[in-house]
C-alpha cells in the first residue's frame, strides 16, 4: 500500500531537508510547493494564495497518479491548518492509501536562528522569512492536536521510522 506523507511545520523547521531525505531513502515522489512557485513565477508574489492553491491542486493530481501506481508521495507544504491536514487525510482514505503526518515541532527561538542563517545565503527556491514573518505565521499555525495525532501515524520528535534523526 502506498503512503502519502504530510510534512507539517513552520518555516525553518527542516521540512524540505527531511522531505528530500525521505525522497532518497524511501524512495518517494517529493512535491515541494516553494520549488514550483520559484520555477513557475520566480521572485513574484510568493504570498499569492490563489497561485499557491493552484499549484497545490496540480501537485495533488500528480500525487494521486503516483499513489495509484504504488509510489509513496511526500507533500512538503507546511500544512499549518488542522482543516487542511484533515482534508488530505480524508483524500488519502478515499484513495485507499495510508496517510502519515510528520510534524516538525521546533521552538520559535531555534526557528529564528535557522532562518537567520538561511536568509544570509538563500538557497534556490527558498524565500526570505523575517522574525516578524515568523511571529505572524506562528500566530496562525495550528499544531496537531492529540485527537488528530490519534488519526495518523504521527512522528513528532527526533526520529522518523526508518529514516533516522530529524534535522
Image: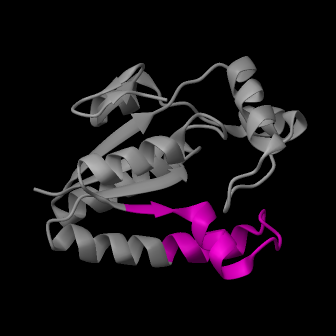
Instruction: In the rendered view, tell whether residue 121 sits above or below residue 4.
Output: above
Q: Quadrant of residue 131?
A: top right
85 horizontally vs 155: left or right: right
Look at the image and tell me whether residue 8 can be seen.
no
Identify the residue at the far left of this view: 1
72 horizontally vs 144: left or right: left
Question: Which stretch is magenta?
Answer: 30-57
Examine the residues drawn in magenta and state their main secondary structure: helix
**Number of callouts in the render?**
0
Q: Position of residue 57 (x, y in %)?
A: 49, 74
57 horizontally vs 53: left or right: left
Instruction: In the rendered view, tell whether residue 146 sits above or below residue 10.
Output: above
Q: Position of residue 93 (x, y in %)?
A: 23, 56
Look at the image and tell me whether residue 107 can be seen.
yes
Q: Magenta stretch: residue 125 in it?
A: no
Identify the residue at the far front of this view: 121
Q: Magenta stretch: residue 40 in it?
A: yes
Instruction: In the rendered view, tell whether residue 130 sits above or below residue 39.
Output: above
Amino acid at each position: 500500500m502506498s503512503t502519502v506523507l504530510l510534512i507539517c511545520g513552520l518555516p525553518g523547521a527542516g521540512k524540505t531537508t527531511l522531505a528530500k531525505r525521505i525522497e532518497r531513502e524511501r524512495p518517494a515522489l517529493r512535491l515541494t510547493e516553494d520549488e514550483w512557485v520559484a520555477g513557475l513565477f520566480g521572485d513574484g508574489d510568493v504570498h499569492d494564495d490563489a497561485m499557491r492553491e493552484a499549484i497545490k491542486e496540480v501537485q495533488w493530481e500528480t500525487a494521486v497518479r503516483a499513489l495509484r501506481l504504488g509510489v509513496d508521495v511526500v507533500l512538503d507544504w507546511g500544512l499549518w491548518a488542522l482543516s487542511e491536514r484533515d482534508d488530505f487525510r480524508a483524500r488519502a482514505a478515499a484513495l485507499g492509501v495510508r496517510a502519515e503526518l510528520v510534524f516538525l515541532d521546533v521552538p520559535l527561538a531555534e526557528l529564528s536562528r535557522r532562518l537567520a542563517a538561511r536568509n544570509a545565503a538563500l538557497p534556490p527556491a527558498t524565500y526570505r522569512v523575517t522574525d516578524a514573518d515568523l511571529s505572524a505565521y506562528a500566530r496562525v499555525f495550528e499544531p496537531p492536536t492529540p485527537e488528530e495525532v490519534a488519526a495518523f501515524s504521527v512522528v513528532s520528535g527526533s526520529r522518523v521510522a526508518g529514516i533516522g534523526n530529524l534535522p
